[in-house]
């Protein structure tokens, strides 16, 4: 009965939070978690689920090549435990921001896992200079409505970058007709996928011979989707309090030049570092704003940071 009560209590917490990514996750007590951590490391071959899909489009797992590629990504991501736990922690913080934007734009919810494999839900900078959670290149960002200059780089603005990613994905879906190819095009480009489909005389992602990164792309997304939705099944143990949570903020409208964001921060009882944590799209310690554009700056509510 105690185990049943613990499970029911945890499910209740999930219902209140609205987070559906942690289905079937038991919430061990502190004592139980410590016991499980002792001499609890084994490596197992994994059973590949019979039915896996991306955005409702089934993976042809009866094809041995597809099965082996899926097996690889499930193994790699299951036994890269430290990274896996970080994905659970960050997903709790950032998925609630991403999910409604995808839904508003008619993009399947599975695309939130694309952001996971692109950046690990961090403001990553790639060797090719793609930036932010969605790893957007400068030209692509500008084409899809982002402001990018020395002062401001909205590839680091999670909400606006997600909107830009949605625009690109909708264009790719219109071009190719499937969400799977749209996701592949996010990695290899719409032109790149078009050329490969034409040169190889196929119409399906799973029939394409591709470079290593794009070849693994959909499989990595589906692997993270499967693991993040089934933590117990893949050996991930955590409590809800172990996960990261967003810091409540309010917005301050700025439509003038800001000569010194360090002084600006102090007006709101925070320092420059904290201002940047909540507004990573502000790239310099000042804002030129010659056009007098309105910018909404996020300020954390009182009590969440200890500032001397």
Image: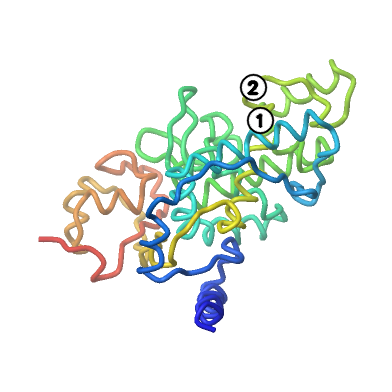
In this orientation, which residue lies closer to the viewer: 231 or 151? 231
Q: Which mark is residue 63?
A: none
**Side of 258 where 161 appears, left or right:** right
Is disc 2 placed on a helix, strand or loop?
Answer: helix
* Image quadrant in which the C terminus is located: bottom left
Q: Position of residue 79 (x, y in %)?
A: 52, 40
In this orientation, which residue lies closer to the viewer: 86 or 149? 86
Figure check: 300 above or below 221: below
Q: Which mark is residue 216?
A: 1
At x 49%, y 39%, the residue is: 80
Q: Are marks 1 and 2 in contact (CB under 8 Å)?
A: yes
At x 17%, y 63%, the residue is: 306
Is disc 1 placed on a helix, strand or loop?
Answer: helix
Scheme by which the image is coloured? rainbow
Q: Position of residue 235 (x, y in %)?
A: 53, 53
Residue topped by disc 2: 212
At x 39%, y 40%, the residue is: 152
Near mark 1 (Cα within 10 A), the count class, few <14, some 14-19 or many ≥20, is: some
**Side of 135 where 176 appears, left or right:** right
At x 72%, y 22%, the residue is: 192
């Amino acid at each position: 009965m105690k185990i049943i009560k613990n499970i029911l209590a945890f499910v209740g917490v999930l219902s209140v939070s609205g987070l559906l990514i942690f289905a079937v996750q038991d919430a061990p007590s502190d004592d139980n978690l410590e016991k499980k951590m002792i001499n609890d490391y084994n490596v197992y071959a994994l059973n590949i689920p019979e039915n896996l899909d991306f955005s409702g489009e089934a993976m042809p797992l009866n094809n041995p090549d597809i099965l082996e590629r899926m097996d690889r990504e499930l193994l790699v991501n299951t036994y890269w435990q430290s990274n896996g736990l970080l994905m659970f922690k960050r997903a709790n913080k950032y998925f609630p921001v991403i999910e409604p934007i995808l839904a508003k734009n008619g993009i399947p919810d599975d695309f939130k896992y694309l952001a996971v494999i692109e950046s690990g839900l961090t403001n990553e900078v790639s060797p090719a200079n793609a930036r932010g959670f969605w790893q957007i290149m400068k030209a692509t960002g500008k084409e899809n409505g982002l402001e990018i200059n020395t002062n401001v780089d909205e590839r680091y603005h999670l909400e606006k970058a997600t909107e830009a990613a949605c625009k690109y994905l909708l264009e790719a879906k219109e071009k190719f007709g499937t969400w799977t190819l749209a996701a592949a095009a996010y990695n290899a480009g719409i032109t790149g996928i078009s050329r490969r489909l034409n040169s190889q005389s196929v119409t399906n992602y799973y029939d394409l011979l591709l470079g290593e990164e794009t070849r693994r792309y959909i499989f990595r997304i589906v692997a993270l989707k499967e693991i993040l939705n089934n933590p117990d099944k893949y050996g991930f143990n955590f409590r809800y309090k172990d996960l990261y949570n967003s810091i409540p903020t309010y917005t301050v409208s700025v439509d003038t030049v800001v000569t010194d964001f360090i002084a600006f921060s102090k007006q709101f009882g925070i320092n420059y570092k904290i201002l940047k944590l909540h507004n990573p799209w502000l790239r310099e310690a000042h804002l030129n704003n010659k056009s007098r554009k309105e910018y909404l700056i996020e300020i954390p509510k009182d009590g969440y940071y200890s500032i001397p």
